[in-house]
Amino acid sequence: MIEIFESCRPVYGRSFRRSATLLLFTIAISIPAAAQDKKPEAAGFECLIQPKMVLKLGTPVPGLISELLVDRGAILKKGDVVARIESSVEAATVSLAKAKAENDSAVRSSATKVEFQRRKEERTKQLRRTDAISVATADEAETAARVAEMELEEAKVNLQLAQLELARASELLRQRTIRSPIDGVVVARMLGPGEYAFDQAQLVTISQVDPLNVEVFVPLSQFRKVRAGMVAEIYPEEPIGGHYTATVTIVDHVFDAASGTIGIRLELPNPDYALPAGLRCRVRFSGLG
């Protein structure tokens, strides 16, 4: 630049020399200033903050959607109701099965009959000892007692089957209420009330953002230097900024030969959802230059 200045001095005169001198001075003082403004976040490796998990929530049974209770941006807890499928028939089936399961009159009637037949059998045995009744009459009383006992067992089995049928009907009804399997945020809604949901349809997409995953690719030279359990500092891009602590959870054992890198995943706690997913960032591993 000094050579250019010397070559132009005879042509443009004193005013050009004054302007060029000021420019050189400005450049000279701006270079160290820029070096001083360099932030520690600039060190390390480039990374990407992603959701821990992304689920496309479906329905185990097809049917007409009667209610869809969430929309994009809704924060869900595990077990929260997301949608309900039309279930009037299933609810009626549960009511019927419950009535059968709670009706133990057949069991009580059979138990009473067994008690009567046992008393009758005992009387016939006493009479038979004195030959007051025939063998056939005594045998008939004994057989009636055994039949009554079998009828009681059958009544008990039928009651158990009714209770199992109630459990089955209740489960079918429960399947028509769609709940969130994780804590997360709704990022998309694909269907709405009144639409028909097939067994492979997607109702909503839920992202788990606590904790977050941090994905980073480092050169192969860092293999064995980065290990699971190591702590690292994460520096999200602006306007989020700041720095956060994450822990290495996965170090790939299959390299990417094309780029000469290895993949690493870190877990970043995000209890108050302060960090959104999809941010670029830089990561600096403790103990690595």
Image (cartoon, rainbow, N blue to C red):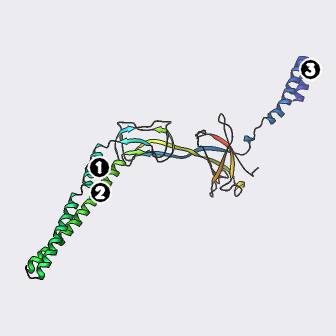
Residue 94: which disc? Answer: 1
Instruction: Locate residue 10: give its quadrant.
Output: top right
SS at circle 3: helix
Instruction: Locate residue 140: give its quadrant.
Output: bottom left
Residue 258, image x and y in percent?
64, 52
**Crowding near the residue tagged with mark 3, few <14, some 14–19, many ≥20 C-alpha atoms within 10 Å:** few
Answer with mark 1 or mark 3, whichever residue precedes in sequence. Answer: 3
Residue 190, image x and y in percent?
43, 38
Q: Which residue is mark 2?
A: 163
Q: In front: 190, or 241?
A: 241
Residue 258 appears anywhere in the view: no
- Give, as a three-letter code, the residue at label 2: Gln
Q: Is residue 198 left or right of residue 145?
A: right
As measured in the structure, the alpha-carbon distance from the residue carrying label 1 to the one carrying label 2 is 11 Å
As measured in the structure, the alpha-carbon distance from the residue carrying label 1 to the one carrying label 3 is 102 Å
Residue 148, image x and y in percent?
18, 68
